[in-house]
Amino acid sequence: MRKILRAVVLMLLTGLLLPAAAQEQPKAPAQSRKKRVAVIDFEYGTVRTAVAGLFGSDVDVGRGICDLLVKHLVRDGSYTVIERRMLDKILAEQNFSTSDRANPATAAKIGKILGLDAMIVGSITQFGNETKTTKIGGAGGGFGGFGIGGFGKSKSKAIVTIDARLIDVDTAEILVVADGKGESKRESTSLLGGGGSWHGWGAGGVDFGSSDFQETILGEAIKLAVEQLSAGVIAGKDKLQARVVVVEGLVAAVDAGSVVLNVGAKAGLKAGDQLSIERVTREIKDPATGKVIRRMSSKIGVIEVTEVDDVSTVCKIVSGSGFKVGDLAKTVTQ
């Protein structure tokens, strides 16, 4: 009998406690958006002579390293990386020069225009070789003492060293520093040798991500260096805070239930953002200067972004009516 009573009591307690425990389960934290970044072509001034000696001309290896790093970051998914097309357009508009590639202040300015959280800038500090010569005769020369008209037999390992910095676009502060060093496991009489079938480069520069190039000993070293560098950049993602951006614009057109604004991605807007539409009812001016010091407004409704380009936005109406050209659009967005 006692066993039966114990079983009944246990069942009653379990039935009472389980719902309470279920209610006390903490809610899963809301997922914050991924931080938006862009990567500027790496600065390679300190190795320019070595690059020209290797390739026979001044090839933009900084662009090649940048493209390879972007591929790693996109594949990992910790950051949202903007398209090169959008970045190149802003760089051209701002008369950005190659000498500014590693400048934190310039990078921060570009990043703010693009509505980013951070910019990644970097430098190539070593782009060469470690040569072992078994026999030297005469006065041969060339890149690293081999490969172009030298005498004797030399074999080299390729060595590439790079570094990157994650720059806060609001303060130009360096939040993360990452390094990468790659050394080929193989040796060859040419840095562009090693068993690959790579035969050159196009007008846009070397594609460091191509399978043919990565079969060379130089490609092997670059791949290892960028893998190490990207791991450091990814590891520092929590040091970067997603920016809260206040966006203000004007209604430029109202057509068939859609509202077009005169602000877009450059201001930080993205699909899904909602904006409050307000109409100015009164302007208060400074009696001494005549300048407007405050605008009183009333809320007309709410719209949601459906399409966005650099300088304009198409929105659907969520609530309200009677929207007019010139109405104010406001939002606080990440």
Image (cartoon, rainbow, N blue to C red):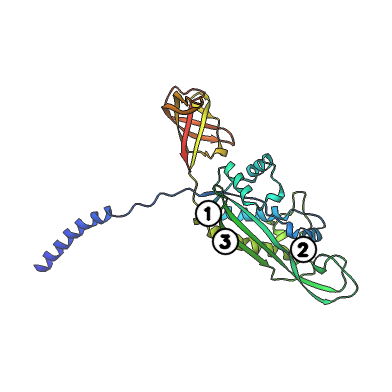
Amino acid type assigned to the residue bearing label 3 in the image: Gly
Residue 167 appearing in the image:
yes
Instruction: Tell me how far mark 3 sits from mark 2, CA to CA.
Output: 27 Å
Q: How far apart, in angstroms, are the residues tagged by discs 1 and 2?
A: 33 Å
Foreground residue among 116 and 19: 116
* Residue 315 coordinates in the image, percent (x, y): 50, 31
- Identify the residue at image location x=70%, y=56%: 210
Q: Residues within 10 Å of mark 3 (few under 14, many from 20)?
A: some
**Secondary structure state at the residue bearing disc 2:** loop
The location of residue 277, given as percent across then percent down, is 45, 29
Question: Where 280 falls versus 331 (above or below)?
Answer: above
Residue 232, numbered label: 3
Single out the residue that lies furthest toward the left.
1
Q: Which mark is residue 192?
A: 2
Tell me which numbered mark, 1 or 2, is placed earlier along the sequence: 1
Of label 3 and label 2, which has the lower sequence position? 2
Label 2 amino acid?
Leu
Say which residue label 1 marks: 78
Residue type at mark 1 is Ser
